[in-house]
Image: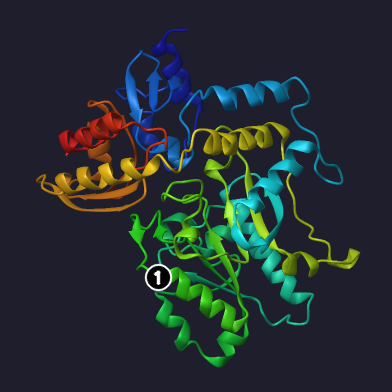
Amino acid sequence: MTPTALAEIEKRHSWHPFTPMQAWTAEEHEPIMIESGQGCVLRDQNGREYLDGNASIWTNIHGHNHPVINAAIFEQLGKVSHTSFLGFSHAPAALLAKELVDLLPGGKMERVFFSDDGSTAIECAVRMALQFWRQNGRPERDTIVAFDRAYHGDTLGAASLGGIPTFKGSANQFGYRVLRVASLDALDLLTADDQSRLAAVIIEPLIQGVANMRLWPKGMLRELNAWCGREDVFLILDEVMTGFGRTGKMFACQHEDVVPDFLCLAKGLTGGYLPMAAALTTKRVFEGFHGAENTFFYGHSYTANQLGCAAALASLRIFRDEAVLEHLEPKIALLAELLAELRNTPGVLATRQIGLIAGIDVERSGAEVCLAARKHGLLTRPIQNTLVLMPPLCVTEMELRQMVLAIQSAV
């Protein structure tokens, strides 16, 4: 089938997320259809090459077509691809659960609940927190504290936690009972009634992704953790974006020596290969569900899918064998230098960075700049007028330079 014929079928039948479909299906529009990838490079239906500047929507960790992950999936395919996790188990899930809890110091994290994506990891943590208090003598604790401009996913409950109306659809009043605050200081201003009803606080640690890559003040997470400890309120960390090396450490919370009550992971869990998520939690939470009447009635058909577990175990092996975190420091330093130079470009208003995550504010439409960047061999997406640069961790220094140059040229 020719690329033109395939594009016509695509425009006639597909419906894309976060995409104005009238413009997408316009006769003159030629959609990019990715056919292959290697490392940080993607190739489209016409053989054109692009650098993957947002890690395929923040998922890819070690690059495309990594031989170690490919081999792990292929080996698992020869055994079994998927069986139910409801009352059954298998070696890849058990081993992955242990490896995940071992990544956090102190042994506080003990249990892993697998699901499908970031939204469902959040749903798991929130529902566990609410059910824990209800069946352990504090049923009045029915409220989740969330922060202004937060984003925690698109399922109904996760969206209700978010603080950006655009992502809530046509009806904004649904889901959990949420108390929204702008800052850490606001927690000390809560009324006694509000404070008595708190079940958990949820936050994206160190940086809010969809809020135009907004950085939290240094030390804020550590102080929030201490506040939750004093008030006996669960702390839920949404590390769907920041987990697995994006910030320079395995998890963002490790920058401030915080181990939460719930840690939500997805996106990079399988190296960006397969949809899979995990909610990690503590012995205290797990023991609060003892007894048949306290069962956690929540789950998904593809929970702990064997192929996903195999990919995730391979990804963690790459972190160890290739010393991925140790090799990030010079790349992070180079990106800081490149962003400092980029700020001198007319049309660039500001830049923000943590690890290999960068937000670049521009005067012009962010969407227009991203379209222009394609002509210079870079694929990425904006959040309004903030360009996101978040390459796979395997990015080379030369590729980083090419990415920033493409943005400069596009602006």
Looking at the image, residue 92 sits to the left or right of residue 239; the answer is right
Image vertical order of residue 5 relative to residue 298, above or below: above
Q: Residue at x 72, y 37 (%)?
A: 305
Q: 227 or 138, which lies in front?
A: 227
Which residue is rendered at x = 66% and y = 46% of the image? 99
Quarter of the image holding residue 51? Answer: top left
Would residue 261 be visible to someone looking at this image? Answer: yes
Image position of 292 (left or right of 272):
right
Q: In the image, is 109 to the left or to the right of 29?
A: right
Q: Position of residue 50 (x, y in %)?
A: 33, 25
Q: Residues within 10 Å of mark 1 (few under 14, many from 20)?
A: few
Q: Is residue 347 left or right of residue 95?
A: left
Q: Which residue is mark 1?
A: 219
Coloration mode: rainbow
For the point 81% across and 66% down, the residue is 289
**Residue 25 appears at what percent x and percent y?**
38, 28
**Front in this rendered view, residue 84 or 259:** 259
Which residue occupies 80% across, 67% down?
287
**Above or below for 36 versus 263:** above
- From the top left corner, tell me how far across and down residue 153 is, in percent: 53, 53
Q: Position of residue 60 (x, y in %)?
A: 48, 36
43 is higher (above) or lower (below) than 384: above
Q: Toward the viewer: 110 or 73? A: 110
Q: Does residue 26 appear in the picture of this structure?
A: no
Q: Amino acid at mark 1?
A: Gly
- Image label count: 1
Above or below, 318 relative to 174: above
Mark 1 falls on what kind of element?
loop
Give 354 or 24, whichever is nearer the viewer.
354
Quadrant housing residue 142: bottom right
